[in-house]
Amino acid sequence: MTRYEPIIGLEVHCQLNTRSKLFSPCSFAFGDPPNTHTDPYVWAMPGTLPVLNGHAVSLAIRLALATHSRIEPISRFARKHYFYPDLPKGYQISQADQPYCTGGYVDLPETADQPSKRVRLIRIHLEEDAGKNTHVTGRDFSLVDYNRAGVPLCEIVSEPDLRSAAEAVAYLRELRTIVRYLGICEANMEEGSLRCDANVSLRRHGATELGTRCEIKNLNSFKFLEAAIEAEVRRQTDLVERGEPIRQCTLSFDPQRDRTRVMRSKEEAADYRYLPDPDLPPLQIDQAWIADEQAHLPELPGARRARYAGLGLSSYDVSVLTNEPALAEFFDATIELGSEPKSACNWITVELLGRLNADSKTPAQSPVSPRDMHDLLDLLKRGTISGRVGKDVFQKMYLEGRRAQEIVEQDGLGQISDANVLRDLVAAVLADHPDQVAEFRQGKTKVRGFFVGQIMRRSRGQANPSVVNTVLDELLASP
Ligand code: ADP
Ligand code: MG
């Protein structure tokens, strides 16, 4: 426990999944060969002019609505100047002092490790992405790929409300879930469609003034975000404890050494020579446009979590189901067919998800449909098959594409509920274990569980457990 608490604010960039770029009709797709998604505007050929992509604005409006933000009726684009080969124009078009969206918040759900928490947002703005430089080690040149240049981004800037690396991760996870529910961003950190910079400072517990912040750039995984913040807190704590000042700076994280490294002292806004872009008129967003986007909003993670909790699911189940929108949709489709929520949740989060994860498949690629799942749950509910047999049936459904009913009939897996049939089976088990029977009759009732196990094994899981219990009691009672 140190005398200082970390203060953290995140700047999160999310790539909007429009078909074309923010200011030109050029296409974009991740992973294509370098420089195959470019056009004269992207190369900054003289005479080309930007035209704003209206769909990008629509997606940005949805993000603002989902984060309870204020959408400004008028906002402006500005040129942010810097010189780097990934930026052909020599400036990036961004929004500076008049962003399209201000205020708002993201509520982090309660988990086993953390209470719920509200993280306030300063702003969200629209801007274009830059290209990507690749520095070739050992060579005297670098490569640049302009596919990403001009791709629309929303930058979401939080207030410095976060107090630990774990909280920062939880916040980024929640943002990721929100943009994926909205369907506005792939939110794949490895591919760079969701990226994050972390601002970190320290302050004495109980103090109200903020300390000097340092900004760690380009954290491209949850793991690195957490490790980088922890490393930066260590670096700043060391400085403070040695009585040295903290200087505002921009850092990078070195995962190999598990430490942050100063790249440069912090540039000031004035260094960028922001100026209003004379080629773009102000962006006007009217109420009709907002209402239209509001109508496009799906159920958001918070609302879905509350609905699932209302169905009696545990907070753990709720978090597993809602984490992945496609899994929640699978669950919804299954219960709409009439399945009981708790058992649907168990089978979907344990059997189905386990299998999908093992095969690196998404719920949308599941060979078992919600209808198939509902049929299986129905057989279980009616007692046609036991839970144990259900698991085998599920595997067969998944691998062979047969329906549950078909498998049970063709493979003779129906549950044995006939007391006469089970009586023979139970009698045989007891006859094979005379010593345990004697122990039981001497009062060691614990061996009862052993008999049940043997009976279930011998019936290949098909014996109806409640009938087994009745018959077993009956036979153990009779001398
Ligand atoms: P810049 O573009 O200069 O980085 P922004 O306003 O875009 O500035 O981002 C500032 C970010 O830094 C916000 O996320 C904010 O919460 C965070 N921040 C500001 N002051 C502090 C501080 N003292 N400690 C930690 N984070 C801070
Ligand atoms: Mg910044």
Image: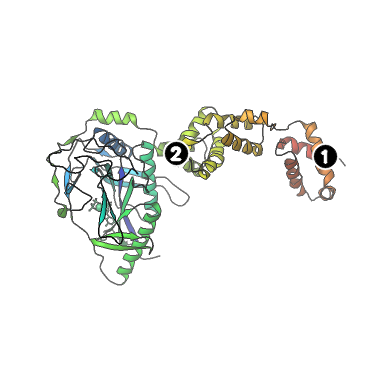
Query: Could you tell me if residue 339 is visible in this image?
Result: no
Residue named by callout 2: 305
Query: Could you tell me if residue 288 is visible in this image?
Result: yes
The kind of residue on which mark 1 rests is Ala
Which quadrant: the C terminus?
A: top right
Q: Where is residue 182 in the image (x, y as percent from the top left)?
A: 36, 36
Q: Residue 31 carries which label?
A: none
Q: What's the CA distance linking mark 1 and mark 2? A: 50 Å
Q: Position of residue 372 (x, y in %)?
A: 56, 30
Q: Position of residue 131 (x, y in %)?
A: 25, 48
Q: Residues within 10 Å of mark 2 (few under 14, many from 20)?
A: many
Which quadrant: the N terminus?
A: bottom left
The residue drawn where x is 78% and y is 35% is 422
Residue at the outermost bottom position: 242
The kind of residue on which mark 2 rests is Arg
Using the rendered view, name the quadrant where residue 124 is placed: top left
Left or right: 409, with 420 as reference point: left
Disc 2, ligand 1: is the CB inside 8 Å?
no
Residue named by callout 1: 427
Element under disc 2: helix
In the foreground, 477 or 392 = 392
Q: In this view, does 406 lie above or below 214?
A: above
In the foreground, 170 or 78 = 78
Q: Is residue 394 above or below residue 448?
A: above
- Pointers 1 and 2 in contact (C-beta within 8 Å): no
In the foreground, 258 or 479 = 258
Using the rendered view, name the quadrant where residue 418 is placed: top right
Question: Which is nearer the N-term, disc 1 or disc 2?
Answer: 2
Disc 1, ligand 1: is the CB inside 8 Å?
no
